[in-house]
Amino acid sequence: MIDRAAEIVADLRAIEARRRALDRAEVALLRSARANKLGWAEIADALSLGSRQAAEQRYRRMAERVARASNAETEPRSESDGGRQSGELGVIAIPETIHPTRLRLIGSAAEVLSERGYASTRLSDIAERAGIQPGGVYYHYRSKDLLIEDVMRYGVALANQAVVAELQNVPEGSSAQDRLKAAIAAHIRVMLSLDAVARAQVTVYSQLPDESKERVRPMRRANARLWRSLVADAVEEGTLRPDVDPFLLQIFIVNTIDGILNWSWRVASARQHARSLARLVLEGVGV
């Protein structure tokens, strides 16, 4: 009985391995098709799908699945469990649970950083704000920089996950414009809800030592890849003008939302923020 159970488990693993291989092969073929200037409509026709949107969404789902599998198989967690970034569409994976004390330290560190900046923030100040003994900080973080790096990662990861979750709720076959609007709204909501963590990860990053920036930068780049894909899809769809640099537009959107805590008092709700920014982007640079 034990031997048979082991055989079944081995067979299931083999099936899963074959599925992952097929996923990777399909994603590679779709990328090759796009690199050779095939449009989504042509790809949809080749795959017997109903529309170009269906082909795009199939690619996204497959690429995200490949990215998650790749993360699980090959990428080690950071020492501080700050999360991992995928190499595909900028989907960042973070642990489902984080130790409550570590979360409290991240929140407290963000508050102190927002008030004093990197150079004037001390571990003893963070410990006092968190309500724990200074020595207790070292149980979770060996240095101030490792804790602050987690503040940076946590803010980016939560914003990324909120956008990804919102995109997964966009109905099948929706336009690239609808997806971009949904992403803008989700990013604004999470930035307003994060408050000190959001403010710290935006304003303090430039103050970090170069080594810390290097450790945090891959996650920021992963999030940028997600936004670049959203903007590129909208350009290809014809929603956005092709003569506008999509890289600069992506930077404009993300940086504007990242700075929302500086001007959010001017508007009553996150929904109004999202509507205004979407109108600015889609009508200001739209076709």
Image (cartoon, helix red, strand yellow):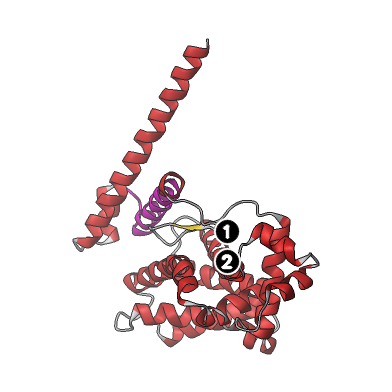
Q: Is residue 135 magenta?
A: no
The disc, 1 or 2, on the residue closer to the chain's N-terminal end is: 1
In terms of image quadrants, where is residue 51? bottom left
Front position in the image: 75 or 4: 75
Left or right: 160 in relation to 122: left
Q: Give the magenta part as a residue range.
A: 48-69
Q: Which residue is mark 2?
A: 146
Kind of residue at disc 2: Leu
Q: Main secondary structure of the magenta part?
A: helix
Query: Taking the image as drawn, is residue 45 in sight?
Result: no
Locate residue 58, reporting x and y percent: 38, 51
**Mark 1 to mark 2: distance in Å?**
7 Å
Residue drawn at the location 42% of the way across and 44% of the way down: 73
Q: Which residue is mark 1?
A: 80
Front position in the image: 24 or 138: 138
Q: Secondary structure at mark 2?
A: helix
Locate residue 240, reporting x and y percent: 37, 78
Kind of residue at disc 1: Ser
Q: Are marks 1 and 2 in contact (CB under 8 Å)?
A: yes
Front position in the image: 44 or 116: 116
Label disc, if present, on residue 183 of the rendered structure: none
Residue drawn at the location 43% of the way across and 24% of the way down: 10
Q: Residue furthest right?
A: 131
Q: Secondary structure at mark 1?
A: loop
Quadrant where the C terminus sits is: bottom left
Left or right: 124 in relation to 51: right
Locate residue 251, reporting x and y percent: 43, 80
Q: Vertical placement of 176 versus 205: above or below?
A: above
In terms of image quadrants, where is residue 130? bottom right
